[in-house]
């Protein structure tokens, strides 16, 4: 079998195509969820904390003023940008919760498949059971 035909057989398998579609849809969906977290949920979280912007929190490591923005402080030297870390952790928690709710919803849409009916007992087994029961009597 040639390499081209082996590759064609591999590439056209259902699992590979399903994976490719999943990656493409996942990338597009990731942008939607990222926008929802950054543009809708995080401003609400910031408002709940008094309009506080976590992303500009930092500890100056080179004596920068704490009144500078993070970008300005980074230009002047090293900073420990823990606010950005807090923002990313909050984004992750919110994203994980949203994905959990979506999976939960999708699972509720799936109809439980009824258990398959037990196959009918073969006639010869039924006859043997009748004979056994007759012999017991």
Image (cartoon, rainbow, N blue to C red):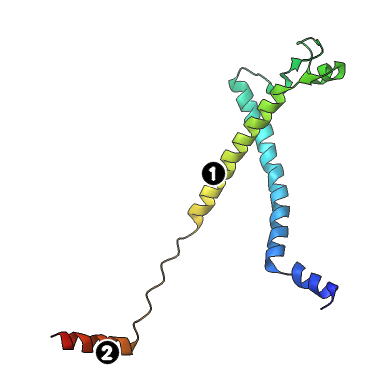
Residue mark closest to the camera, 1 vs 2:
2
Residue at figure coordinates x 62%, y 22% from the top left? 47
How far apart marks 1 and 2 lie (CA) works out to 54 Å
Q: Earlier in the sequence, mark 1 or mark 2?
A: 1
Residue 81 locus on image (x, y percent)? 74, 22
The residue tagged 2 is 127
**Neighbour tally class for label 2: few under 14, some 14-19, many 20 plus, Cα within 10 Å:** few
User: Quick one: SS at disc 2?
Assistant: helix
Vertical placement of 100 versus 44: above or below? below
The image quarter containing residue 134 is: bottom left
Mark yes or no: residue 40 visible. Answer: no
- Residue at the left extreme? 137
The image quarter containing residue 125 is: bottom left
Which quadrant: the N terminus?
A: bottom right
Comparing 128 with 84, the one in front is: 128
Vertical placement of 39 versus 68: above or below? below
Residue at figure coordinates x 70%, y 22% from the top left? 82
Comparing 128 with 117, the one in front is: 128
Q: How many numbered circles does the render carry?
A: 2
Residue at figure coordinates x 69%, y 56% from the top left? 22
Comparing 25 with 65, the one in front is: 65
Residue 55 locus on image (x, y percent)? 71, 23
Comparing 136 with 33, the one in front is: 136
Direction from residue 118 to residue 44 in the image, left or right:
right
Residue at figure coordinates x 72%, y 43% from the top left? 31
**Neighbour tally class for label 1: few under 14, some 14-19, many 20 plus, Cα within 10 Å:** few
Mark yes or no: residue 116 visible. Answer: yes
The residue tagged 1 is 101
Residue 59 locus on image (x, y percent)? 73, 16
Direction from residue 22 to residue 137 in the image, left or right:
left
Residue 65 locus on image (x, y percent)? 79, 9
User: Quick one: SS at disc 1?
Assistant: helix
């Amino acid at each position: 079998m040639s390499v081209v035909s082996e590759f064609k057989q591999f590439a056209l398998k259902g699992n590979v195509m399903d994976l490719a579609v999943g990656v493409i849809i996942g990338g597009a969906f990731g942008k939607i969820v990222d926008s929802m977290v950054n543009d809708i949920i995080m401003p609400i979280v910031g408002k709940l904390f008094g309009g506080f912007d976590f992303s500009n929190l930092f500890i100056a490591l080179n004596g920068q003023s704490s009144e500078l923005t993070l970008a300005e402080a980074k230009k002047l030297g090293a900073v420990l940008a823990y606010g950005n870390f807090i923002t990313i952790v909050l984004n992750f928690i919110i994203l994980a919760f949203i994905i959990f709710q979506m999976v939960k919803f999708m699972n509720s849409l799936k109809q439980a498949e009824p258990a398959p009916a037990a196959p009918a007992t073969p006639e010869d087994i039924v006859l043997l059971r009748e004979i056994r029961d007759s012999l017991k009597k």
